[in-house]
Structures are given as C-alpha cells and as structure tokens.
Image (cartoon, grey):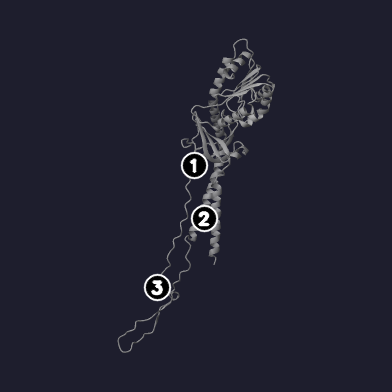
Amino acid sequence: MNGPKTISVYRVLTIWAISLSVMIGAPHVTKIKEIPNQPLKKYVTVAGMIKERKGGKGHVFLTLADDTGTVTIPIFKNTSISKERLQEGTSIMVHGKVDLDRGALHRGEFEVIPEYDGDITYPSEVSPPRPNPQPVQRSPLEHPLLQPKRTVMPEVETTGPTPQVEPPVHLPSPETLGVKTPGPEPSSVSRPILIVLIVLVVLVGLIGLVAIVKLKGFEKRLGKTEFEARVRAETQHQVGLLADENDLLIKRVMALIPQEGSQPPEFLRDATIRSQFLDGIKNAKTRIDIESPWITSWVIQQLLSPLEAALKHGVRIRIVYGFKMPGAAIGPKEVDTEKQAAKLREQWKGYDFKMRFGPTHGKAFICDEKFLLLGSYNFLSFAGIFNVNTNSEIVTKIRDKKVIQELRTQTFDF
C-alpha cells in the first residue's frame, strides 16, 4: 500500500540532488555590457565569438563579442593557455578577472584576463545530452498452471455399442498449488538501484562543494605571492609595449630642441597635461594643430564646444590622425576613429578646418606660436581621468618658436 507514495518521495529526492549538482557546477555567464558595473579584480565568466585577434611579443589580444558589446581578452605569453585554436570566428567561454587595460592601444577600457588553461573553453565541444532509453516491453509470464481454470473433457471411445463417458477431470487452480498470479508489470528500475543512484548524485554534489571551498582557501593562501607574480608579468608586458614609443619620443624631442639659445623645456604629468591642452584650445588666436593616433566618441564630445568656438573666432585647425599596424587587420578602435573623423569633416566643412590620415603614433599639440606639447598623451582618445587603475602620462612643454615652426612644417602644413 505504501509503494506509490514511497516511490514519489524517491523521485523528489532525485530531482533535488540533480538540481543541487547543476547549481554547483554551472557557471553564471555575464553579459559584456554588464562588465563596467563589476568591481575591479572580480572574476566573471563571459561568452561570445572572437571578432578580432592581434598579437605581438608573444602576447595575444582577442576582441570578444556577444549580442551586447565587445570586450578585450588579453592572453599573456607567461600563461599556460594554448593560443593556436583562438582564431577569429571561434566561439569561446572565458573565465577571468575584470581589470582596466593599461596598454597604449586600449588604455582605460575594461578587459577580462584569463590566467589558466582551463579558463577558456569551447562550447561546441560539449556533447548533446543522450535521450533516455525506452523501457523494454516484456511479454507476460506464461505457464500452464497460471492459465484460467478450465475443464478437460476425456476422449470418448467410439468403439462398442454404447459409448461410456468418464466424469470430467478438474485441474487444480494456481492458488491451490501455492503459485501467485502475476500482478502489474514491475518498474524497469528497482528500488535499491534508485536509492544507490540518489546517494551517488548527492555525494558527487557534496564532493564538488568541498573541492570549491578548499580551492578558494588555497587561492587565499597563495594570493599574495601569485598577485605579485601577476603584477610583475603585467608590468613587463606594458614596458615592452611602450619601449619603442618612448625611445622614438626621446629621439624626436632631442632632435628638435636647439642646443644653444633655446628656452628650457617644462615637463608636465597626468592631469596637468589635460589642463594645459584645454587652456591652449580656449586661448588660441590664430592656429591649433593636433596629432593623435585615435579619436574616440566619448572624448571628442567633450572637445566639440571649445574647438567650434575657436573656429568661429577665425582660428585655423589642422588634425593628423590614424594608426595602422603593418600586417594587422583594422580593429574596432580604428573603425571608430574613421567614423568620428568623417563626422568632424562634415560638421566643420564651412570653417578653416582640415584633417589628414597619418598613419601616425605621435602625440602633439601646438597653440599658435606660444607652446608645443609633445609626449605620450593621446589628446583625442583619452579623457584625462587619472586614478590608481590608469598609467601615468608625461609630455614636454616647449616654447621655442624655431622648434614649433619646424614641427609644424614637417607635420601640419597641408
């Protein structure tokens, strides 16, 4: 009588155990547009398709896209992550740490940094679930003693004058012989096997939970040493990317500054650079010259009003822009730069305003004949917000008119 009720309890326990193991093992996938809302250093999981792949000096930089946006996935050369399969058009799932890009190419943008080989998976390799096999239909148990009670008539002898009919013989019923008649078909999974399956599922879930707790404790114990190693590796990566740029900058400044009779240069850092740049635009009387590899929408929107005010006062503006890496495909940042350049040409076509594609990686700003800012600051793609998560910038402020005229002739006379 308790059979159906007990089986229902077993089914409820089975569903609970399976749900527990799924909740423990299944990762939460974060949409890319939600990454700016995540705290820095938090570990998240994102999924999407590789839209672009770039590399240099052993590092690989992926642009991962989903239906909400794109994010940079840097894979540094000192990690154990295999990079051969990470090609454009491949769908991947990435588990990593949220951080801000400190490189020259995507400075200030958010990125997700994987650290170990298992942090990148390929959803296409997950095998589809197998359908449950249909239970085998067994034929009913057949036995002569289990057939319905019947009467067997003896044969009638036809020889002789008068046939004698013997009395009927009655076979005993199955109940009389102690044989039980078959009831309804038993379930295809016996009760002991079902109990074993439930116990196994619960044990697997508990083992997974214990493993996760121990792993987090192990990460905390090794957190300081591992963090220092990551910081050293990331610092070496940033130094490698900026070494060529800094060498070129030093040679350019030394070549332009006369050895005798020149005014001493002034060195500016971080927020002071942005302040001097905006003051130069506001106070310009005759001419403004800007050289910047990239143009981003959120930065140029802040500069539209002061630049247009200068144009309306008769100031001549020349802009040199456009970065191109030999042998590399055009990335989203370069596409956005061309889009913003086209808007500026159309908006200010009635003024003394011209733009020219470099290609260039130089950064310079000239206000009239007053001063020149020359250094590492991206004037049209960096908003000048400095904090503990951004790299420091430096420029040289030069007031020597001969140096200003030399650079203007080389770069901005078009």
Pointer 2 residue = 198
Residue 121 lies in the magenta-colored region: yes
Pointer 3 residue = 144
Quarter of the figure that contains the N terminus: bottom right
> Is 123 above or below relative to 305?
below
Q: What element carries label 1?
A: loop
Instruction: Name the residue rendered at 56%, 31% in the picture.
Output: 335
Quarter of the figure that contains the C terminus: top right
In the foreground, 205 or 298: 298
Residue 271 lies in the magenta-colored region: no
Q: Can residue 387 be seen in this view?
A: no
Furthest-bottom residue in this view: 161
> Is 116 above or below relative to 273?
below
| Tag shown at residue 94 | none
Q: Which of marks 1 and 2 precedes in the sequence?
A: 1
In the foreground, 17 or 44: 44
In the foreground, 180 or 119: 119
Residue type for callout 2 = Ile
Q: Percent from the top left, x then y, of residue 268?
A: 64, 21
What is the span of residues highlighted in magenta in the rendered image?
Answer: 120-124
Q: Distance between the residues labelled 2 and 3?
A: 41 Å
Q: How far apart are marks 2 and 1 (CA)?
A: 30 Å
Residue type for callout 3 = Pro
> Is 45 above or below relative to 12?
above
Q: Percent from the top left, x then y, of residue 317?
A: 63, 22
Q: What element carries label 3?
A: helix
Q: Which of marks 3 and 1 precedes in the sequence?
A: 1
